[in-house]
Amino acid sequence: MIMNNKKEILEKLNALAPTTSIRFKERVEKRVARGEYLERSRVTAINILSALRQRKMTQKDLAELLNVTPQTVNQWVKGNENFTFETIGKIEKALGLGMFELTRPIESVKVEI
């Protein structure tokens, strides 16, 4: 499904703006390609927030455990972060989670509101 959406977006871009600069088209193509990875980042962000809520912790608490700024944690939970395995591992360890629990699809994670 994602592939069809990407193809449709790129086709619409070419139809609407055949004379648009190549640089602009390249930027749009890169952004469309990143979509799948951004979706994974959003899932990870939601899972971080859920884990914090379950533990009655704040973003500031997590920042202190990881020796990072609260602003860094805030960036993570906005869902636009390109996480490294190292960062995911440190967060999971700080929250007492198993390996790659933060990156599991949301359907398999119980989200408490």
Image: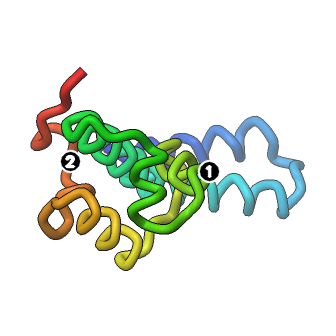
Residue 56's place in the image compared with 42, above or below, is above
User: Going 54% across and 64% down the picture, which residue do you hit?
Assistant: 68
Quadrant, the N terminus: top left
User: Going 43% across and 74% down the picture, which residue do you hit?
Assistant: 84
Question: Is residue 3 visible from the viewing direction of this image?
Answer: no
Name the spot of residue 40 as percent of width and height, x first.
36, 53
Question: Is residue 100 visible from the viewing direction of this image?
Answer: yes
Q: Quadrant of residue 55?
A: top left
- State which mark lies toward you, 2 or 1: 1
| Label disc, if present, on residue 36 of the rendered structure | none
Badge 1 is on which residue?
71
Judged left or right of residue 82, residue 103 is: left
Badge 2 is on which residue?
105
Q: CA distance from mark 2 to mark 1?
A: 25 Å
What's the residue type where badge 1 is placed?
Answer: Gln
Residue 103's place in the image compared with 56, above or below, is below
Q: Quadrant of residue 26?
A: bottom right
